[in-house]
Amino acid sequence: MRKRSFKIAVFLLALAGFFGSVILIGRWARDQLRDRARYRLAFTGIEVDPPPGMTRDAFLEEVQYWGSMADAMSLVGPNVSERITQAFRRHPWVADVTSVTIRPRQIKVQLTYRRPVLAVRVGDSLRAVDGEGVVLPKEADTAGLPVYADKAVPPAGPPGSRWGDAGVEAMARVLGRAGAR
């Protein structure tokens, strides 16, 4: 019995050593590939359709800024897709990241953008709000949008955050649901 237990223990130890070696070799190989030019891509090389009124380059520059991303990135490594997803989610125009596809020398991102449904007067200008009451960037087109009739407090936060006025947010939700039909 003792001899058999010893053999099982040696076998399990050898098996653990084998799998541990495979994991270490895999990490070493990934680290070797990470810095090769073939597996790096400029952030501005990401394939994405920009929101209305923006060029792809201007949009990617803003995403890079809002997401604190480097000028170039490795396509190999842990959490690459998640880091890209988080960078795009921080942009005020982005409602959702539908997919991130990573291939050698290519990243393709598909997004759902916020859609303006309401214009709110702030001083002498109008600001657009989406169907969830989220403030859109100042450049968002307000032409043809219904204008909030009551006096609203200024936005509570930067673009991409909720307006902070219960009336504005309620009206935006109503218009958002009506537009979804």
Image (cartoon, rainbow, N blue to C red):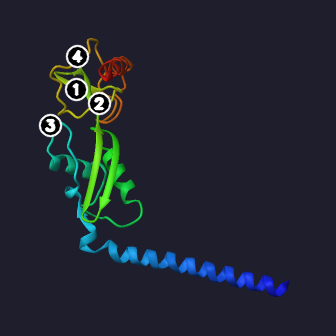
**Does residue 105 sit above or below 169 in this rendering?**
below
The numbered disc on residue 53 is 3
Q: Quadrant of the C terminus?
A: top left
Assess disc 1: are there few (<14), some (14-19) or many (≥20) residues with their C-alpha within 10 Å of its C-alpha.
Answer: many
Earlier in the chain: of badge 1 and badge 3, it is 3
Task: From the viewer's perspective, tell me whether residue 10 is left or right of residue 164.
Answer: right
**Does residue 157 sit above or below 149 in this rendering?**
below
Q: CA distance from mark 1 to mark 3?
A: 15 Å
Q: Quadrant of residue 35?
A: bottom left
Identify the residue position indicated by label 4 in the image: 146
Q: CA distance from mark 2 to mark 3?
A: 16 Å
Q: Are marks 4 and 3 in contact (CB under 8 Å)?
A: no
**Does residue 87 sit above or below 173 in this rendering?**
below
Camera sees residue 58: yes
Q: Marks 1 and 3: which is nearer the front?
A: 3
Q: Secondary structure at mark 2?
A: loop
The numbered disc on residue 135 is 2
Assess disc 2: are there few (<14), some (14-19) or many (≥20) residues with their C-alpha within 10 Å of its C-alpha.
Answer: many
The front one of 128 and 116 is 116
Q: Are marks 1 and 2 in contact (CB under 8 Å)?
A: yes
Q: CA distance from mark 4 to mark 1?
A: 11 Å
